[in-house]
């Protein structure tokens, strides 16, 4: 058979993987049915069959994609390459639908998947927002409303985690002068395990849904339909990806920095990726444990959270929020890193208070572990815990304020330019301020007792996420788009995206806060017309659709520009960062020669200042074609 014939549909990892997933689910269900039959029980019981089938399906997916092939050869004692390579037959788009060990390809895979499920979560939101545009039940029954609302929350969180993975994977090695992540095989595994996780989350729509919200609190989650179990499994696999990816980021930053790049010469984005990875590595296990215990409670009748069996539902909330509040900083720290990275470039000034900004990321990460119980002021937990958690919650404002005042000082008297990335950065700063100012009332016991579970919380959380992640994520996409593709996006469409999204978001978030103060509860599918909030809900819904249109404009802009956009100049933003000293797109082996850091990263506007020497003698031969490898060996 010819190479052309062999490189068919099933040479593409995603398609093989999906087939393997289906086969694995069927095999898993068969194993459960056979085991029950041999035990004298009825062969078919949906819940254990689907749960075991999903686990087998995830294993089948990972085996079929080929992401485990190198490890399998190593386990058999075969020789494996120190620098694993993807299938050389796969070119163009097929390369991004198959297993690759190149951190840049994996970063793009993370980013594309993030945008895909971000759009799906947005469609869920627009559907139930249309239902809420007026009181009464229009077209969504309450169970369907609850499922879409719950899926919107958890799928959006998954999209953000994947977006964080996209930025960390693509940028961290480039910014520290490395040729790849520390563990390329683990990096590929961490991406691909997300795919069955996403499939299981979406499958809840067809398996009865679930009505618990994205938090999955028992005892409601212990009694929810079968879709609840698929929710738990989906989050479990996405969480596993987060843990493995975090481990890889930490190992890469600690061990693969270029010569001369001390910790206080690292770009700020690398600092935030470091702090984010520490949270992901140390806290994610708790949400996996809490969901696993509810799974076991449903499957085996265990009573971890069932009071009649000696369990305690408050325990679930402690386990859940010990991860889920630090998870907010996983999202936000990455976005704040983008803001701090881009502001000096477009202000042409050094980043004010660089060391304080760097350390503030770890301050936020540390304090973030001490605030989880402010979500539980109304839960019935021990009253004496309220005041300590109130103070620890308010303490987060200190390291966060360090960043904010650094941004203001960096902007002050800067020579600002207002390209699309800068507009999104400034929009992020203003919206994050709204999220920050609306936060303290939720952390103070006396006000939180009234605001808890109202739409005020919804508005606050959306402001925090849009200011801390969504706007910075779009800033990052526009900023690094020329580096990824070698082409420029359309500036007019980029600005149209911004000028539609910013005011629409303010209408949406402030409207949510307003209806919350007037008594609107969150997570409900109807409301009393007597509250007088129908017009506000209509405005919130319209604003949501405007945001959706702005995102569609962005997708059109990026897709068209990637193919037909103007060819980008070498360094369109005049950045000092190492990745911008390379050609665009970045070569397969990032740095054919070793680089050396000889100055400070943000000395913009200081004459004669140099950050990176791009032609330093390499400390080791990079994984490169023979000619480059021989040159490196000669240099050694």
Image (cartoon, helix red, strand yellow):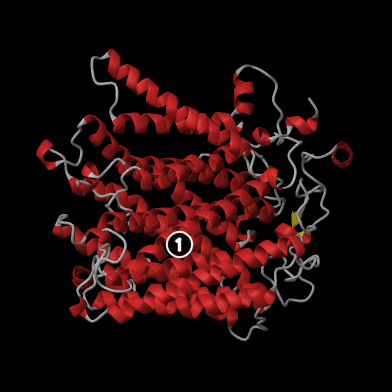
**Label 1's element?**
helix
Residue 324 drawn at (x, y percent): 36, 53
Task: State left or right for residue 500 relative to residue 375.
Answer: right
Q: Which residue in the structure is indicated by mark 1?
A: 122
Q: Residue at x 50, y 43 (%)?
A: 194
Q: How many marks?
A: 1
Q: Position of residue 378 (x, y in %)?
A: 18, 61
Tell me residue 543's x, y (percent): 43, 76
Residue 297 visible in the picture? yes
Q: Is residue 23 left or right of residue 170?
A: left
Q: Is residue 375 above or below residue 297?
A: below
Residue at left offset 31%, top offset 52% = 215
User: In the figure, 581 relative to 32: above or below?
Assistant: below
Residue 199, compared with residue 262, is above or below; it is above
As rendered, which of 392 and 497 lies closer to the eye?
Answer: 497
Quarter assignment of residue 447: bottom left
Residue 374 image point, x, y percent: 26, 61
- Which image quadrant is residue 415 in? bottom right
- Residue placed furthest toward the left: 308
User: In the rendered image, which quarter is residue 516 located in?
Assistant: bottom left
Q: Would residue 24 appear left or right of 611 to someone viewing this image? A: left
Residue reaching furthest front?
139
Quarter holding the N terminus? top right
């Amino acid at each position: 058979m010819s190479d052309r014939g062999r490189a068919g549909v099933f040479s593409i990892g995603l398609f093989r993987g999906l087939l393997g997933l289906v086969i694995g689910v069927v095999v898993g269900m068969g194993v459960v049915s056979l085991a029950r039959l041999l035990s004298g029980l009825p062969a078919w019981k949906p819940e254990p069959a689907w749960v075991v089938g999903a686990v087998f399906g995830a294993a089948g997916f990972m085996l079929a994609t080929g992401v485990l092939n190198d490890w399998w050869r190593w386990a058999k004692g075969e020789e494996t390459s120190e620098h694993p390579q993807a299938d050389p037959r796969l070119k163009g788009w097929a390369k991004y639908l198959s297993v690759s060990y190149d951190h840049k390809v994996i970063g793009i895979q993370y980013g594309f998947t993030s945008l895909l499920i971000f759009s799906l979560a947005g469609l869920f939101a627009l559907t139930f927002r249309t239902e809420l545009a007026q009181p009464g039940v229009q077209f969504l029954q309450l169970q369907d409303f609850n499922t879409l609302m719950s899926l919107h929350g958890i799928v959006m969180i998954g999209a953000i985690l994947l977006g964080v993975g996209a930025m960390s994977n693509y940028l961290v090695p480039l910014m520290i002068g490395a040729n790849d992540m520390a563990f390329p095989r683990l990096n590929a595994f961490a991406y691909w395990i997300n795919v069955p996780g996403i499939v299981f989350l979406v499958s809840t729509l067809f398996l009865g849904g679930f009505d618990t919200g994205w938090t999955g609190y028992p005892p409601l989650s212990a009694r929810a339909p079968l879709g609840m179990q698929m929710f738990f499994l989906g989050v479990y696999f996405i969480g596993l990806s987060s843990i493995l990816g975090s481990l890889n980021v930490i190992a890469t930053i600690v061990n693969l920095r270029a010569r001369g790049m001390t910790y206080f010469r690292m770009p700020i984005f690398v600092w935030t990726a470091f702090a984010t990875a520490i949270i992901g590595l140390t806290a994610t296990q708790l949400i996996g444990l809490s969901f696993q215990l509810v799974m076991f409670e449903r499957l085996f009748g265990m009573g971890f959270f069932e009071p009649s069996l000696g369990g305690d539902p408050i325990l679930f909330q402690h386990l859940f929020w010990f991860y889920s509040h630090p998870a907010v900083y996983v999202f936000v720290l990455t976005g704040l890193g983008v803001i701090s990275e881009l502001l000096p470039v477009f202000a042409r000034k050094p980043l004010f208070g660089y060391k304080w900004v760097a350390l503030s990321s770890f301050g936020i990460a540390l304090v973030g572990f001490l605030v989880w119980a402010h979500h539980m002021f109304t839960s019935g937990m021990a009253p004496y815990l309220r005041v300590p958690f109130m103070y620890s919650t308010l303490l987060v404002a200190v390291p966060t304020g360090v960043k904010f005042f650094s941004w203001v000082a960096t902007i002050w008297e800067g020579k600002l330019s207002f390209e699309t990335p800068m507009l999104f950065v400034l929009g992020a700063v203003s919206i994050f301020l709204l999220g920050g100012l609306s936060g303290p009332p939720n952390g103070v016991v006396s006000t939180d007792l009234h605001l808890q579970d109202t739409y005020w919380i919804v508005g606050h959380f959306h402001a925090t996420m849009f200011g801390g992640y969504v706007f910075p994520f779009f800033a990052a996409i526009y900023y690094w788009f020329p580096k990824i593709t070698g082409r420029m996006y359309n500036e007019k469409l980029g600005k149209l995206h911004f000028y539609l999204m910013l005011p629409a978001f303010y209408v949406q978030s402030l409207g949510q806060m307003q209806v919350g103060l007037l008594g609107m509860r969150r997570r409900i599918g109807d409301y009393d017309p007597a509250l007088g909030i129908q017009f506000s809900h209509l405005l919130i819904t319209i604003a949501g659709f405007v945001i959706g249109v702005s995102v569609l404009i962005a997708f059109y802009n990026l897709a068209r520009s990637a193919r037909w956009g103007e060819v980008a100049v070498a360094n369109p933003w005049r950045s000092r960062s190492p990745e911008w000293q390379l050609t665009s797109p970045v070569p397969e082996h990032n740095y054919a020669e070793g680089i050396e850091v000889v100055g400070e990263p943000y000395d913009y506007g200081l004459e004669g200042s140099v950050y990176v020497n791009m032609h330093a003698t390499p400390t080791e031969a990079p994984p490169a074609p023979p000619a480059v490898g021989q040159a490196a060996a000669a240099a050694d």
